[in-house]
Amino acid sequence: MHMIEAVIKPSSLDGVKAKLTDLGILGVTAIEVKGFGKQKGHTGRYRGGRMDVGFVPKVLLKIAVKSEDLDKAIEAVTGAARSGQVGDGKLFVYQLDKVVRIRTGESDNDAL
């Protein structure tokens, strides 16, 4: 089992969700976050003056997948979120040692 964390543009969220749903991956947590990287934030206006906001709105997706679904899930996220522009985001993958569904007590792959 693996955890995928993807930081994407908010405008990409619906496309990513649709691709994952098509694969049968239904468990996704989306968190509104702010960050910067090569995009280096943006400037805005406040009371007529320009100010450097410094952070760009993003969405952090947390997706737990079975090992056999990992490559398909990565392809779905990157394919739906890629525009070719700076700021498309990043994707991180790490191993999950244990998963438990609290309601039923099911564990590992059965809990996904």
Image (tube, grey):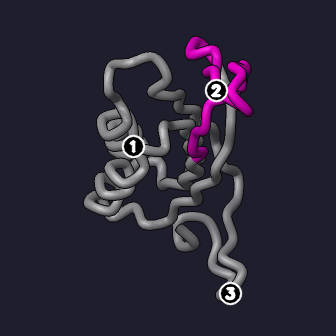
The residue tagged 1 is 12
- Residue 47 % position (x, y): 73, 32
Viewer-proximal residue among 97 and 23: 23
Looking at the rendering, the stretch of residues picked out in magenta corresponds to 37-60
- The amino acid sitting under disc 1 is Ser
Give the mark nearer the N terminus: 3 vs 2.
2
Local secondary structure at mark 2: strand
Local secondary structure at mark 3: loop
Give the mark nearer the N terminus: 1 vs 2.
1
Q: What's the distance in space between the residues labelled 1 and 2, CA to CA?
A: 22 Å
The residue tagged 3 is 103
Q: Which mark lies nearer to you, 1 or 2? A: 2
- The amino acid sitting under disc 3 is Arg
- The amino acid sitting under disc 2 is Gly
Viewer-proximal residue among 99 and 86: 86
The residue tagged 2 is 44
Snapshot quadrant of residue 108: bottom right
At 53% from the left and 28% from the top, the residue drawn is 90
The image's mark for residue 2 is none
Local secondary structure at mark 1: helix
Which residue reaches farthest bottom? 104
At 48% from the left and 37% from the top, the residue drawn is 9
At 67% from the left and 43% from the top, the residue drawn is 33
Q: Give the crowd class for mark 3: few <14, some 14-19, many >=20 residues within 10 Å.
A: few
